[in-house]
Amino acid sequence: MEDFLYEDYANYTYDEDAAPHEEPVFQHRSACTRDALCVSLLVITAAVFVLGFCGNGLVIWISGFKMKKTVNTTWYLSLAISDFIFCAFLPFSVAYMFMERWIFGYFLCKFFSSVLFLNMFSSIFLLAIISVDRCVSVVFPVWAQNHRTVRKASVIVALAWLLAVGLSLPSAVFRDVQNQMGRTVCYNNYTSHRQSHQIVVLSRFVAGFVVPFFVISVCYSVIILKLRGNRMTKSSKPFKVMTALIATFFVCWLPYHVFVLLELNHQRYGRYVLSVGLQVGTCLAAANSFLNPVLYVFMGNDFQQRCKSSLLSKMENALGEDGRTTSRYLSRSSSVDARASTHI
């Protein structure tokens, strides 16, 4: 994610005396195949690409073309599109990691990074939106039943994407290509805007992690307390699923943001530490794109009971539950129709 130039955190150089465009005196050769960590990350990233591309593509096909449009399918379709686009661009990252040089030109350097950050933010915002929607449906079932509409959900999704576009613009502005020690690199050029690096990183951390994680944690905590307060709730599955959602978001995104923040003061930390940290953090962040359909779709209620049906039938049933999971725990104590779309 953060620039996909893991081995060279000095991309954020402010040395105005540097001569980045001098002709190289030797030809750079990739050493990735001789590095166990690099090979491992290549394999993991390739696996994320295959699983995420296929999994999210299947969700898009089912929720977008095989099912009636509902609020839930609107959330899932938008989330799947975001993760699908992210995974579709991962081969560029794999090629860059393997060759340790950028061969796709100036335009794709800017476009590639911008698209990745666009989908990073849109995916995270949609996860937060889904959490708020579920919380409102549980705490205010009457209001949710009367006001949750596909049109309003579509407007919210559009606003989330617009905000994501705004936050991804710095990648297009500061991304650059240069020849460096015998290789072409795609990097962030903050030489003329020394404070921009700090502003961009901090804004990404706050908008892309702190606020969404707070919203997700609060919403699912409220749902858990609501369900635990209901004496008719006997199954522990909702609590396990929601705990998994929070833990997955935290584990996938925290390491990435930690090392990006450490990079702001890279003089205090070893080159190897930052390099490895950025590689591992980026890989974990990418893994979130194929874990989303698993957690938000495939873990739908009664999934195990549908094992005899086809894969497409399973997904269609899971996506179309439209709130039956949480309502099952609340229906005996609520006078409201349990079809308030509180799917967990």
Image (spheres, rainbow, N blue to C red):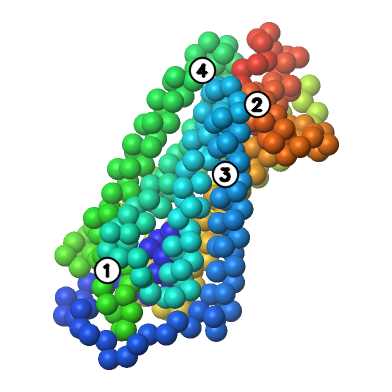
Q: Tell me if residue 122 comes above or below residue 140 in the rendering.
A: below
Question: Depth check: 52 or 168 in front?
Answer: 52
**How far apart are the two marked residues, 3 and 2, measured between alpha carbons?**
16 Å
Residue matched to label 2: 320
Instruction: Determine whether, in the image, residue 262 is placed left or right of residue 246.
Output: left
Q: Residue furthest bottom?
A: 25
- Three-letter code for the amino acid on which mark 3 is drawn: Asn
Precedes in sequence: disc 2 or disc 1: 1
The 10 Å Cα crowd at callout 2, few under 14, some 14 to 19, many 20 or more, is many
Q: Please give the name of the residue rendered at 72% of the width and 35% of the height, measured from the top-left corner.
A: 314
The 10 Å Cα crowd at callout 3, few under 14, some 14 to 19, many 20 or more, is many
**How far apart are the two marked residues, 3 and 1, measured between alpha carbons?**
32 Å
**How far apart are the two marked residues, 2 and 1, measured between alpha carbons?**
46 Å
Q: Is residue 87 visible?
A: yes
- Three-letter code for the amino acid on which mark 2 is drawn: Gly
- Report the mark closest to the observer, 2 or 4: 2
- Three-letter code for the amino acid on which mark 1 is drawn: Val
- Report the mark closest to the observer, 4 or 3: 3
Precedes in sequence: disc 2 or disc 4: 4
Residue matched to label 4: 148
Residue 177's label in the rendered image is 1
